[in-house]
Amino acid sequence: MVKCDKSILNRLKRTEGQIRGIQRMLEEEKECSDLVTQLSAVRSSVDRIMGLIVAENLKQCVENPDADPEEQAEKIQKAIQLVIKK
């Protein structure tokens, strides 16, 4: 479960605004290079959000370990796989 962190929500809202801006740029037939620049910014933002969520998950695993060490190790491995999946 992901803790609903206000900073993550704010980042998502900013990213949502960037995507709306890209939609407007497409409608206004802006330059391809400008669109790609904005799309790259959105991708970076989403990557950062994913990193924050996985980091929070790992932090919770370390700070609040499960009674079952195997289950704990499985959760940590799952979080690591999310990071290196890219």
Image (spheres, helix red, strand yellow):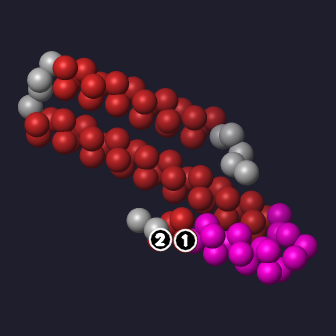
The amino acid marked with disc number 2 is Ile
Q: Which residue is mark 2?
A: 84
- Residue 41 is marked as none
User: Looking at the image, do the residues carrying marks 2 and 1 touch, with CB atoms under 8 Å apart?
Assistant: yes
At 74% across and 60% down in the image, what residue appears? 60
Please give left or right for residue 64 compared with residue 48 in the image. Answer: right
**Furthest residue to the left?**
31
Tell me which segment is drawn in magenta: 64-80
Give the camera-side residue of 23 and 13: 23
Give above or below for 46 relative to 79.
Answer: above
Residue 50 is left or right of residue 23, and the answer is right
What residue lies at 12% left-to-right and 26% top-to-bottom? 30
The crowd level at tag 1 (other Cα within 10 Å; few <14, some 14-19, many 20+) is: few
Q: Main secondary structure of the magenta part?
A: helix
Residue located at (90% from left, 73% from top): 67
Q: Is residue 35 above or below residue 48?
A: above
| Residue 34 inside the magenta-drawn segment | no
Relative image position of residue 2 (x, y in whole percent): 69, 48
**Label 1's element?**
helix
Q: Give the structural element (helix, strand or loop) at label 2.
A: helix
Give the residue displayed 73% in from the left and 78% down from the top: 73
Answer with the quarter of the image where residue 6 lies.
top right
- Where residue 68 sits: x, y (%)? 87, 76
Q: Decide: is 49 above or below 68.
A: above
Above or below, 8 against 77 in this view is: above
Quadrant of the drawing holding the C terminus: bottom left
Which is nearer the eye, 20 or 37? 20
Tell me the CA gap for discs 2 and 1. 5 Å
Q: Seen from this angle, which residue lies furthest front?
A: 27
The stretch drawn in magenta includes residue 73: yes
Picture disc at residue 81: 1
Residue 71 in the image: x percent, y percent? 79, 74
